[in-house]
Amino acid sequence: MNKTNNALTLSNLFAGYGNRIILNNISLNAEKGKIIAIMGRSGSGKTTLLKTITGQLPIKHGSIHIFDKDINNISNKDLKNLRKNLGVLFQHGALFSDLNIFENIALPLTELSVISDRELTTIVLEKLDSVGLKAAAHLPITKISGGMAKRVALARAIILNPKIVLYDEPFSGLDPISSGIIADLIKTLSKKNDCTSLLITHNVRETFKISDIVYIIDNGMIAASGTPLELVNSNNPYVQQFIQGNIDGPVAFHYPETEEYKKWLKEQEQKI
């Protein structure tokens, strides 16, 4: 494969659970240093995509290249080294409630690196300072707000200076001010650390402010892609329904009647 400027490339990707296909022929590129958003309504396949990229779900067909390396065709050692360049901010933070803020952020360093206590303290406090929480290092996780918890999780996601950071619903459960803070941090840290950011989200407002390219997924396929401005001006009815949050549009309010439902309904009527 020729060298590209892509940090992450998905080619003709199929993935799912058991025999059920969720992702149907997904192809996309995430250029180095760019902020890429994967958007779509609930159940569209966003979370499945994230799990496939992080290796939680196997690839049924197609490929995932990280820095031009096919993750399905490299040694376990090389795969482990590649994953050190992946930082993940999980939707619910995945913070340890029995540890304080400092200890939560320090955990990846203590697990994967051999450094002195002085170096550890310096690095952790630097990352905390970058998210505005240096003076909160001593606080227990149980005593902080949802917005602060997101910032702590973000600091932990970048503690190893990854080249790619994956954000799983970074704005969920946050008030407008906290969402704006997280969006600004994602943009600032992406530029400062020269890393590629991949956002899995359905928050249109904050995502469109900071993203370079947006992919909109529906039913496991890419329904549209482009810059935020291009999508705002798109004539695609699904794109407009998603962006505007309209009730009427291609996505119907009523769940469609399937043959399975008709069979079930007939069985119910026979019981009456």
Image (cartoon, grey):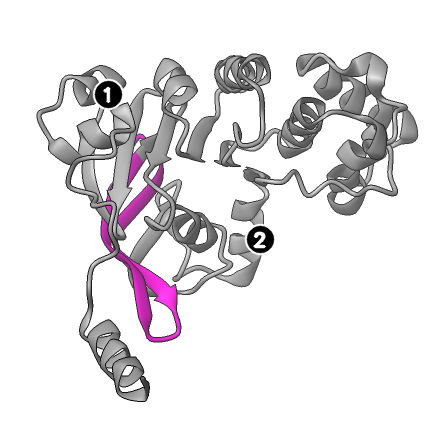
Residue drawn 13% across the image and 23% down it? 234
Residue drawn 40% across the image and 16% down it? 210
Picture layout, residue 210 above or below residue 101: above
Which residue position is annotated with label 1?
227
Give x and y (percent) for residue 145: 74, 25
Give x and y (percent) for residue 18: 39, 74
Picture layout, residue 180 above or below residue 221: above
| 20 magenta-colored | yes
The image quarter in which residue 23 lies: bottom left
Q: Nearer the viewer, residue 217 or 116?
A: 217
At label 2, which amino acid type do we have? Lys
Give the side of residue 49 with respect to residue 12, left or right.
right
Q: Which residues are magenta?
A: 1-29
Q: Nearer the viewer, residue 29 or 118?
A: 29
Give the side of residue 247 with respect to residue 132, left or right.
left
Label 2 crowd bin: few (<14), some (14–19), many (20+), radius 10 Å: few
Which residue position is annotated with label 2?
80
Extreme residue in the bottom direction: 271
